[in-house]
Image: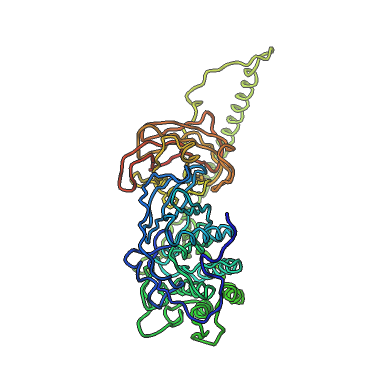
Amino acid sequence: MAERSTAAVDVADNSGDKPLTAKADKATTDGVTESIDTADTAEQSTNGTGGERKATEPTIATPELHSGHKLARRYRLEECVTRLDGFSSWRAVDEKLRRAVGVHLLPADHPRARSVLAAARSSALLGDPRFVQVLDAVEENDLVYVVHEWLPDATELTALLALGPLEAHDAYQMVTQVSQAMAAAHREGLAHLRLTPSAVLRTSTGQYRIRGLAVAAALRGISSDTPQRSDTEAIGALLYAVLTQRWPYESDAYGLHGLPKGVGLIAPDQVRAGVHRGLSELAMRALVNDGATASRQEQPCTTPDELVKAVGEMPRIRPPEPAFAAPPEYQRTTYQQGTYGRPAAGPGPSVTQTVTPPPPALQGRTGKALKWAVSALLIAALGLGSWQLADALLHRDKGGSNETGNTQTTDHGDGDKPKAPLPIKIQDAEEYAPDGSPQNAADVKNTYDSSTTSYWRTKKFNDGPDLVPSVKAGVGIVYDLGSAKDISTASILLRYGGDHTTITLYATDSLSPSAPVKSMKQIATVKTSETKADLKASTPVKSRYVLLWMTAMPYSSQDNYSGEGYKQAITDVKFTG
């Protein structure tokens, strides 16, 4: 990578008093562009977040590339997610490291090509894990392309906001992590200038990551005379949005409604009931340059460092307590129910259950005689049982071996037949993706819900049927049996038949194992072309956690959720032991 350059993103001057003047426009999956309909007018209004776009540039034709095209004999383009302003953004595969990546492409003669290269190389040198990392920035064959991380398990803030406002703790974590990351970037002379909801991702572990640092603005030709204030106000807008599910300007953006026209900027706790007051004031301090809030006067936050300090002065917001289900109602047995028994539930009047009194004890000589007879019979039965037991043990000791020590062989009766395997109930399951690229983690429960119509599916792959080595090491699910059980057989129903599906069961140590598959104990394996796979262990293996590991899957045509390719789906899994 070349030496760091800040000229590409125009962040050298952090002074100035003008508020931001770029409109918040619609974002797409790559987090750097908006729809074509708003491309020419996005930065011409005065109520959004971001820097100012440079003067109009001549239209540049986007390079005509297609799925399957390879860059540097390594990056295979899979799907175009954006094509705009002379550049395109793709989801691609790094065939050398077998992982998904994102790629921005533009012609080498594009007026922004040099600034994009400089911005990408500067961002790559930062190396902060809180940002989506730039992996490569190359000019080759009349093309400039920037390769960056692709996080399949992360969710855009735009998608989270579509579900509703975030809880106070989640909003606190977002503003804390994003402001700290941007403060670190500005200390190195880097700005974002397009810090929108689509540029902020939340991973499955709850960490927030920012994509498009410097590169997003360079691709769109955006600059700002006050980059620190621009990014600080953008963070304030994000905080306002997650607290209220409203965009803090009059225009609608990112699937959110703007504020009513003519009322100006009002505090989040006046827009929606139940908003945390401290976070509401923090959002206003980042958004309102004169520092006015709804309840008191505070100094405005005009740089990410000031915002980090303001967050640190707030009392820490703890996560909500987990909700526990009420225990089932205690059921009294018959002999416990009486005048103090719990009344029956229902709309009618409660009725005390009557208890039948026990029969009276036997009286007189007849009763005494009967008692002695029963006692004698019990004593006789115990004596006979003890004698038979001792006789059986004695015969077994005598017949077990002869004087020469040779073991005698006896014929087994029907009572000595091996017991039939018992079904083992699955308590929980999680997808196992050691490469960090899960297939469909949300639908894992469909594999043990006793329904053959629901299923967990893999993605479709262009190479197969064997995933190793061209695609990945495999895909799998770890099942929790609740406690250690002897696993002897497994029955797996599949959605697709054909040549061929390979499944192996392994015993592992946890629901989210860190050890590689090759270090786990194998239980059984099967290779099948049918839609049912039956696995049987040579000897039962005792384990609480079982990994179902799939390393080959058949070719199937297009269906209602994916195109043609090598893929598989699991509809039902049963274990016995």
Q: Nearer the viewer, residue 66 or 244?
A: 66
Q: Nearer the viewer, residue 284 or 401?
A: 284
Residue 360 placement (x, y as % from top left): 48, 53
In the picture shown, does residue 264 fall above or below 169? below
Q: Residue at x 44, y 36 (%)?
A: 552
Q: Residue at x 63, y 19 (%)?
A: 400
Q: Is residue 310 visible?
A: yes
Residue 439 placement (x, y as % from top left): 44, 47
Q: Residue at x 58, y 29 (%)?
A: 384
Residue 464 figure quarter: top left
In the picture shown, does residue 391 fall above or below 518? above
Q: Residue at x 51, y 75 (%)?
A: 225
Residue 194 placement (x, y as % from top left): 46, 68
* In the image, farthest residue toward the top: 404
Quadrant housing the N terminus:
bottom right
In the picture shown, does residue 380 fall above or below 151? above
Q: How many marks?
A: 0
Residue 298 placement (x, y as % from top left): 56, 85
